[in-house]
Image: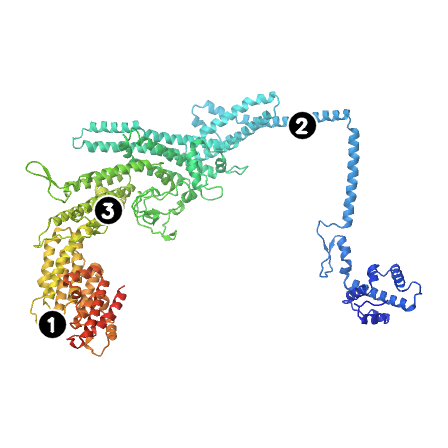
Amino acid sequence: PPMSPSVPTTTGAAATSSPSRATAPSAPNANEVLANLILSDPLIAEYDLTSHTSADQQKYAAALLAKQNSSHDVSSDTLGEVDQKLNVIKTAIDDLVREHPAEIARPFLTLHGYDVASDGEHAPKRASDNLAPISTTRERCDRLRRQGDLVLSISQRVESSLTARGLHQIEKSTTKLERLLDLSAALKQIMRLKFETTKIRQAQHLWQERESSGSSNKSLMLIDLRDLIRVSSSVASVEALFRELECEGQESIAIIEKLRPEANAAAAAVRSAAAELLVQQEGSDMDYSSALGATLQVYFHLGELGDAVWGRTSELLSAAEKASSQLLNPGNMQRLRDSAKTEANKLGAKRGEAERVLAKKLLEKRAEAASKWASGVSDAAINVLTIQSVLARKTDAVSRKRFADVVAASPCPDKFSQAAAELSKNSNHFSLFDYFWKQFCIILGARIQRLLKFENGALAEDVAALYPPIRASASELLGRLAGAIQAGSANSNADGSDFNNSIAENGILGGSNMLLTDAMFLGWKDASPRGENYDESSIVDGGNNLGLTYANMSADRWTRSIGPTKEDGDVSTVHAFSSSTFSIVNKEWSVLQGGGGSGLQPLRDAFLNASTQRLHKPLRTFFMENVAVDEDGIAMVSSALPTIPSSYDLSLVEKVILSELSLADPREGGGNFCMASMISSNVVDMVRELCNEARKATSVAVNADDGINSQGATMNFHYIRSDGSLTENLSHDLKLADFMNNLSTIIKKAPEKAFVLPYRPAVLPQHEECARKCATSLTPAIREIDKLVDSFILSPFGRTLNKQMSAALSKMHAGAYLENSNRKSFVQQHVGVLLDAIAVNHLSSLPQSYAVALSAKVASHTIDSFISNMALIRPLGENGRLRITQDLADIELCLEQFILSGGSSSSLSQMDGGRPYAELRAARQMIYWNGFDDKTASPAEICKGILREPWIANVRPSTVLNFLFSFAPDLLSSPHESKNKKIDEYVSMLLEDGETNSWIITMACCDAFYQRESVSAANVDAGDRRVANVLMQLGQDLLRRRK
């Protein structure tokens, strides 16, 4: 047949060759050969002649013959060509099967459930389970067919047997079987019930002996707790069986009804014993804890653990409420006062001492009542703590349930709903004591508020007076709670951790060291100050304005010293304070201090308000209008200045301050030492109010409409007359300064008088410690007084004296340092005399602390003014320089004596940081500078030379610039002349306005000099013309260095 055009001619040639050459294609090319044959002869693909069976060959041959010519005979050439093609096909198929069997076997393997990789891997892999082989599928189908036949046969048999008679028999048999099963279950329950009842009967002696005993507590001590736990388990099982039998709705069974009374009696006896064990208080702590654990186990078996614990906690809360109600009620307030009056009258005190005796008796009665209150609350709180500790450690041996988790999962009673609402906002951790303590504080705060409002505050004063003894008793209460926690430190949790240590760090009390007396147990840390408003909500004791608090520590670390530790990014410091008055931070005290009207907050606020009123009461008569009575008895204003409080008024202030501070003394006021800082903050507020009134009473404020601001006096005010005598304003302000100084002295000595002197010679370390902390808390009051005196009295007075000094120093420009002058020392004639007059007439009339401050102001201004005036002297020759050098030594000596006369212990070199004295010493070197002697030096070189001088760093830029004017020609005007001011006025402006203004004036002078020089350059007289250029280049560098 003709070849296809797509087949190359070489293929035909290869086909007509010998059969041996027909097998020439290699194995890799076998696929290509077979593909080419299929493409070349479409009959192969049409008849699917890829196999080499004889039938296929005959079909193929017949097709070839029919295609060419059906009428002709098959020639030998045609048959040979057919044979050749068949041989080629066979050879290609054999090569493909031998070299690539996977390509041939893949469809069959896939059909039987195998997956052959396409990359030619020879090991077949089992296909996924969802593709089962044909054999497996056939077996499954056969199995399903057999099961279907079996089901069909059974259904036919059942259908044939289910007649009316057969169905009735089946129902009857089923009913009998059900009754039989119910009877069997009931018999089993009865047998178990009899077994449990037998166990209860064996332990019947437990409550029979208790009923025969006269004392229930004694009988409880004789009960074996293990037997009680076993009986409770049996009672719980019996009650469960009774409930099951009742739920089934059966008729009463005689044997069950016979056992019921005995079981009910046993259950009642077990519950009664458990209830009494729950409230038992006798025995040691360990015995009570063991009995409590057994009791809770009994309630756990009975399924009443949550109700029993919450019920007992409610009873303890009621006991604490009862203790509070006995103390905080109107009748008790009146009884305390009446009892104190009765005992005071029995003593028969004198008339002057009756009030003091009554106050002492009232203090004793209130302290006794507060101690009784604390005792009742602490007993209830310790019981709750014990219950919580047992709950935290106890776990059921069978179910492995923690008792604390069981109680936490039980519903909270309505009595603790307020505490639950508050605690749920902060933490999800369950703590029985937190619920008890929070609810108690809420109820306590509400009771105090009602008592304060009773009859429109009729009892507010008596109620507020209860805060110191209640505060002291509360500290003892927390100390007892801490002791109760630490008493069981050897016990462990179920997980092996130390329960009490966990409480000490994170739990109930945070590890209180209330009763410790060694500084090694106190881990202090410095916190940031809390500002002016005192807040002690996080400090049990020892709160102060410095923010000193304690770091938390557990009980196992109290036996060794704790060094500085790093907490919250700050290194804490251990302070050597050893006292029982300060204890560490704990959340129970924070809750008791209260917030939002709970706890002791209403009582504390009432106490602070009453203390504030007592402290401010003497201030009502201070700084009254100065009124005098004339001959006719008519009141008239004698002066615009208000009156100054007298020494009697000052004694009243001292008395009330000591009286308030003594409230923090346990012996004198019934409180505790930790209240000293709180009361001190009230004293500071009183002093601030007093300073505000004193500020309005100063002569500056009275005589000027805008004479005061936050920094003090701003007006040009004079204290001294032209003849040197004191004005009324100065006399008034000196009296005010003396009053404020006496007040400052009283405040400084108040801590020692309140806390140390009453105990001498038997002074304890806590007394001295409390005095130190009180003095620290009162420091803001002393600073407020010093600020007032300095701003409104000393500063105006100092400005007045400085003006006199400036006027005296300006006289040096009247020829004191001329070349031909033969005058005596300028300082001795003018400055020394004035300094002596100031020391005698003014410094001696001031208190020492204020005299020292005033002498420092005058001395500093004298040095600055003398150097500024000296720099403006023109011309300045050699003789003038020698005189100035002598005067510099004289003024240093005069100022040293002036400062010592003011009472200062510091020298002139230490005044104002040493700046004025350093400039005074540098001025001696400056006046002998001769940089303009080199006529060839340029202005830039002269500037560099000045900047390299050693004295340039200590001299003000204005002094250097003004000193260079002494080398300038007359065309360069002096700065004060360019401003048309007197020298003393210019120096005062220079000292007040600063250095920038001096540089602006200097540039203006240089600009004027350049204009004059351009007009009359030939008429420049003696002087160096480079001075102006030096000033323009040097000024900027000096100001830049000073900044």
- Classify residue 750 by image quadrant: top left
Q: Nearer the viewer, residue 507 or 642?
A: 642
Taking 16 as reference, is 304 left or right?
left
Quadrant holding the C terminus? bottom left
Q: Which of the two marks, 1 or 3, is nearer to us in this view?
A: 1
Q: Amino acid at mark 2?
A: Leu
Q: Amino acid at mark 3?
A: Ala
Instruction: State how far apart marks 1 and 3 are (Cα).
Output: 55 Å
User: What is the spatial separation of the Cα atoms under label 1 and label 2, in whole angstroms?
Assistant: 139 Å
**Residue to which mark 1 is pinned:** 879
Measured in 3D between alpha carbons, the distance from the residue under mark 2 to the one under mark 3, in whole angstroms, is 93 Å
Mark with earlier residue (2, 3): 2
Residue shown at the point (84%, 60%) measured from the top left: 49
Lower position in the chain sequence, tag 1 or tag 3: 3
Q: Secondary structure at mark 1?
A: helix
* Residue matched to label 3: 781
Q: Is residue 286 visible?
A: no
